[in-house]
Image: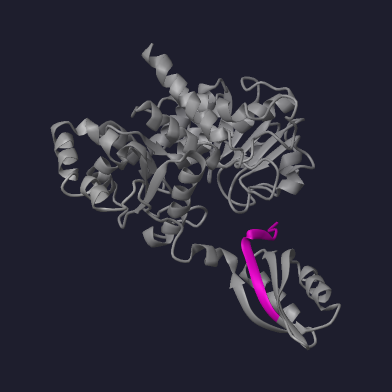
Amino acid sequence: MANPGPGNSITLRIDAPSNFSVTSELAATAAAAGAVITALDVVESHPTTIVVDLTCNTTDEAHAESIRDAVQALDGVHVRQVSDRTFLMHLGGKLEVVPSVPLRNRDDLSRAYTPGVARVCMAIAEDKSKARKLTVKRNTIAVVTDGSAVLGLGNIGPEAALPVMEGKAALFKQFANVDAWPVCLDTQDTEEIIKIVKAIAPVYGGVNLEDIAAPRCFEIEARLRDELDIPVFHDDQHGTAIVTLAALHNALKVVDKKIEDVRIVLSGVGAAGNAIAQLLLEQGAVDIVACGRNGAINRDDEYTDAHRIELAATTNPRNFSGSLKEAIVGADVFIGVSAPNVLDEADIAAMADDAIVFAMANPTPEVDPVVASKHAAVVATGRSDFPNQINNVLAFPGFFRGLLDAGVSDITPPMLVAAAEAIASRVDDEERNASFIIPSVFDPEVAGAVAEAIVRVVKAGKE
């Protein structure tokens, strides 16, 4: 199912004969090898040769190599170099620290640093709450990971997790003007992670937990929320749940069904699956069957981890005990946050009429979206190359913007619901259709709408 995409974009620098047809031959050859051409530039021109940069999207490294070989096989053509555009973007990292005040002369320096800064230090020493007003704390988030559950890559460690955390920090800044910094910890011990985050908390106005494996992530989040006076948000749980609820809200309108009436099958009972189930229950869902590797979570089986015990107690009212493929028969909604290709065309065909399929495993969904669309009325994925991308960037920047603006530490279910409603509302009634149930991640109004929704919930709670 893999499609060429910008995540696997390459540029081939090519020496070629100088003639009228060479550029079209290069493009045609690359396209015949499965490349999606995005640019072709003549960078040098000589009497008998030209130098061409051919940029294209591929599926993976092996595909990129096959494209190079196909182009190289043309008469008189030599591929000098193949540049991976994704790696080039990451050279030197994706973040920098820039002063927010001028440092033009001795006068500026005397106020920003010594001796003037000492007066600010003493003011905070006398009243620690002033740190939020007088330092970066008021607008800075720690993006914390232990590298144990990075994207779909698994337990790859803190160094390998750093490019993802840098990206997360960049998204905070780009979409909500929140300063964020990656904190990748070289430990996967629950107590040590909690201790470290508590120790660095004075610098930050909030903590975004990221890519920490379940069930450890549940205890870490719960303990830090209890023991810190700043908001702690596990995006893999609550960010995913918020955006899923927003998409489902609009998808149900497309098929004219209500959340309290539909049968929902959930594949994946880790951090995301657990949070999705609880938020859907909060919104009135009644019939949810959550499936793990061994089938449906039910009341007859015994579980040792708290989140499965909770799912068994709060979901599956019919106490169904079969497999995922058995559970999906007759279901109205499938939500996948699990593994690639766990369903096929026959499974989707067995769902109810006007079914909704959210296959969100990345990079390869639980079912091929093209195949699913043959039978389901609405299909969404976590990918950017299909309609209806369910992407956490719609939630977490604006959510933290609202928390920081409201100056609160508690995160409540009404906040999660309000954020989902704010996202869903960016798709109006006239535009909503099977291919447009969730706004684009580049919608400039989303983060502000989510932030305003959080502030409203906080103000309502104080009245």
Does the magenta segment cover residue 2? Answer: yes
Q: Which residues are magenta?
A: 1-14
Question: Residue 216's x, y, as percent?
Answer: 36, 44
> Considering only vertical position in the picture, is 303 above or below 449?
below
**Residue under the point 71% across and 46% down:** 369
* Quarter of the rendering containing residue 405: top left
* Horizontal side of residue 417 vs 104, given as left or right: right
Question: Residue 424's x, y, as percent?
Answer: 61, 28
Q: Quadrant of the N terminus?
A: bottom right
**Residue under the point 72% across and 65% down:** 39
Residue at the extreme right: 20
> Considering only vertical position in the picture, is 332 above or below 92?
above
Residue at the extreme top: 463
**Residue under the point 46% across and 43% down:** 172
Question: Residue 416's x, y, as percent?
Answer: 48, 28
From where the camera sits, is residue 299 visible? no
Which residue is more in the foreground, 284 or 8? 8
Question: Residue 264's x, y, as percent?
Answer: 62, 30
From where the camera sits, is residue 340 visible? yes
